[in-house]
Image: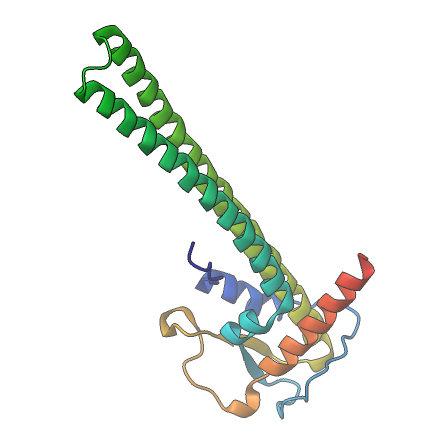
Amino acid sequence: MKKTLLIFGAAAIMAIAASCNQNQTVAPVATVAQDSTAVAGSIVFFNMDKVMQGYDMANDLNSVFETKTSGIQAEIERRGKKLEKDASDFQTKVDKGLLTTSVAQAQYQKLQEQQQSYQQYVLSKQQEMAEEQQVMMNQIANAIAEYVVEFNATKGYAMILTTAGDILSTPVVTADPRLDITDEILAGLNAAYIKIKESTK
């Protein structure tokens, strides 16, 4: 199965940006990367694509998801090949006249039931994985949103926007690179994720 790409739509991105402007009291968060030259009250931005590529939590969750989808895909292929073999064997016996009409009808009915069961299995697994992927994306989006709110509690930026590869899904077309806080956001996210992982050991 092709590698699953995590893509945040415009609504998710805007939700993260909007959450940064809420007046919430949170503890200061230390940043690891060098600060940008933006001052309090500035409108700054970070690159969501770069964050998603470098965020350890996103990579870990995606790795687990890919492993599971690969296993499911292998099982789907195994069941599909067995069904094809059973159908081929049945057709061969019919062509050679090795089955009576009643036996052939019974086996044909059984093959139809197997085909229906296979299709239902594939559909259920597709739905299951789509749901798990959505939950995973929600977890990542929530973690980013919460961190950005904490981050901005110490920075006091007027607004934090995001950029992405697709110009149609980003509120930022061009900006002064001195307002780019991507490295700070990414470093802070990974530092926070490390603490979470250590606390669960």
Residue at 27 percent across and 29 percent down: it is 88
Asked where in the image residue 86 lies, by quadrant, the reply is: top left
From the top left corner, tell me how far across and down residue 70 is, in percent: 49, 50
Could you say which is closer to the camera, residue 60 or residue 25? Answer: 60
Up the image or down, 94 lies above or below 21; here it is: above
Q: Nearer the viewer, residue 162 or 112?
A: 112
x and y, in percent, of residue 184 in the image: 65, 81
Image quarter (top left, top right, bottom left or bottom right) of the N terminus: bottom left
Question: Is residue 147 among what the camera can see?
Answer: yes
Q: Quick one: 156 or 75, which is closer to the camera?
A: 75
Q: Write the residue at 65% across / 89% down.
A: 39
In this view, 1 is above or below 107: below
Q: Name the quadrant of the C terminus.
A: bottom right
- Locate residue 100 relative to residue 143 in the image: left or right: left
Residue 135, horizontal then vertical, whole percent: 57, 50
What's the residue at 68%, 80% (across, down)? 156
Q: How many marks?
A: 0
Is 4 positioned to the left or the right of 67 in the image? left
Scheme by which the image is coloured? rainbow
Left or right: 41 in relation to 28? left
On screen, residue 140 versus residue 95, left or right, reads: right
Which residue is painted at 64% across and 68% down in the image? 56
Instruction: Tell me if I can see residue 25 in this picture.
Output: no
Q: Position of residue 48 (x, y in %)?
A: 52, 72
Asked if residue 172 is positioned above or below residue 179 in the image, the reply reads: above
